[in-house]
Image: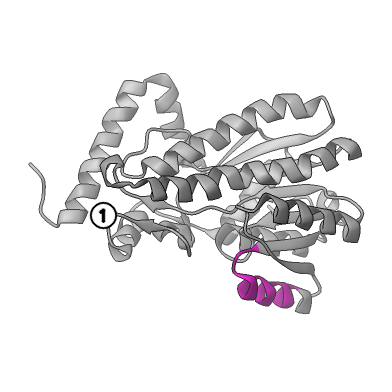
Amino acid sequence: MAPNTAELAGKNAFITGGASGIGAALSAKLTAAGAQVWIADRQAEVADQLARQLRSTGGAAHAVELDVRDPEAFEGAIADTVNTGGRIDYLFNNAGIGIGGEVDSLTLDDWNDIIDVNLRGVIHGVQSAYPVMIRQGSGHIVNTASMAGLITTTAQAGYTATKHAVVALSKAMRVEAATHGVRVSVLCPGVVRTPILTGGEYGRNKSVSREDQLKLGEALRPMDADVFADKALRGVLRNEAIIVVPRWWKALWYLERLSPALSMRAAGIALKRTREVQSAVPLQ
């Protein structure tokens, strides 16, 4: 079932990390539903190509070169969006990178890189768009976290730390924002077939090759990004607080809440598998 296009038609949506993966799929779904979309990405040329493609099929799309690590650039991009569109109805704080590796393999540069994009990038979006939405008395901020923000996740401590923080920020904001007429949701994808499976354009893994990362991801039955975007948008339109897609991943979230100890045991099994792939020698 497609999203309710009546609710999206004529809306203005700003999407970070909008040139590829989940962001590109959301851009396509939103424009097809009649929304006007600003595709913000560090990959300016890729964003421009997508915007031109969407316009060629009748969509209203604009490309914005944006590094979410730059708060002044983010504020300027949101101001330009409001000046052009008159308002901002949706902010999808979707940009993210993956830096895989166990804690003892991470450097301070690794921590700074992933925090700057995955957490500060979201904060910069909130700081830029939330005051505008408060003045409007409406709007919806959708932060992309991950299942790694809901469950115990090994061999990617930096990633899971930032995603847990995004979930916490979103939950607190949702309660506060409701008093201003503003909605807040957090997307928690399971495994989706996008570049983030191997860290994304600007990510990396400290111990596993991209080829082996892809094998590990594919073993978890990744969902197609277009299918994910359709289901995620339905959750957004229902104003769900925490949107988990694919739905079967909710079982792991329930396990985490029911028994953290069992969840950590499951994470230990996953870590063993990761180490086996890394070494190509089964561990005893």
Tell me where the magenta segment starts and ends, as one range. Answer: 41-54
**Is residue 268 placed above or below 179 in the rendered structure?**
below
Q: Quadrant of residue 256?
A: top left
Q: Give the image location of residue 66, x and y in percent.
A: 66, 61
Relative depth, front residue between 107 and 48? 107
User: Label 1 belongs to which residue?
Assistant: 207
Indicate the quadrant containing the C terminus: top left, top right, bottom left or bottom right: top left
Name the magenta segment's main secondary structure: helix
What secondary structure is found at the residue carrying circle 1? loop
Number of residue marks: 1
Q: Residue shown at 89%/61% (left/top)? A: 84
Q: How is the image coloured?
A: one colour
**Residue 52 within the magenta-colored segment of the rendering:** yes
Q: Report the amino acid beneath label 1.
A: Ser
Can residue 110 be seen?
A: yes
Near-viewer residue (197 or 127): 127
Is 131 situated above or below 83?
A: above
- Is 241 magenta? The answer is no
Badge 1 local density, few (<14 within 10 Å), some, or many (20+)?
Answer: some
- Who's the residue at 35% across and 61% down the image? 214
Compared to 214, does 149 lie above or below? above
Drawn side of residue 78 relative to residue 168, left or right? right
Say which residue appears at 81% left-offset and 52% top-offset: 8
Give left or right: position of 87 versus 148: right
Q: Is residue 11 left or right of residue 214?
A: right
The image position of residue 11, as x and y in percent, is 84, 53
Residue 245 appears in the picture as rendered: no
Residue 177 spot, x, y in % from top left:
77, 29
Which residue appears at 47% of the width and 62% of the height?
A: 202
> Where is residue 210 drawn, in percent x and y?
33, 63
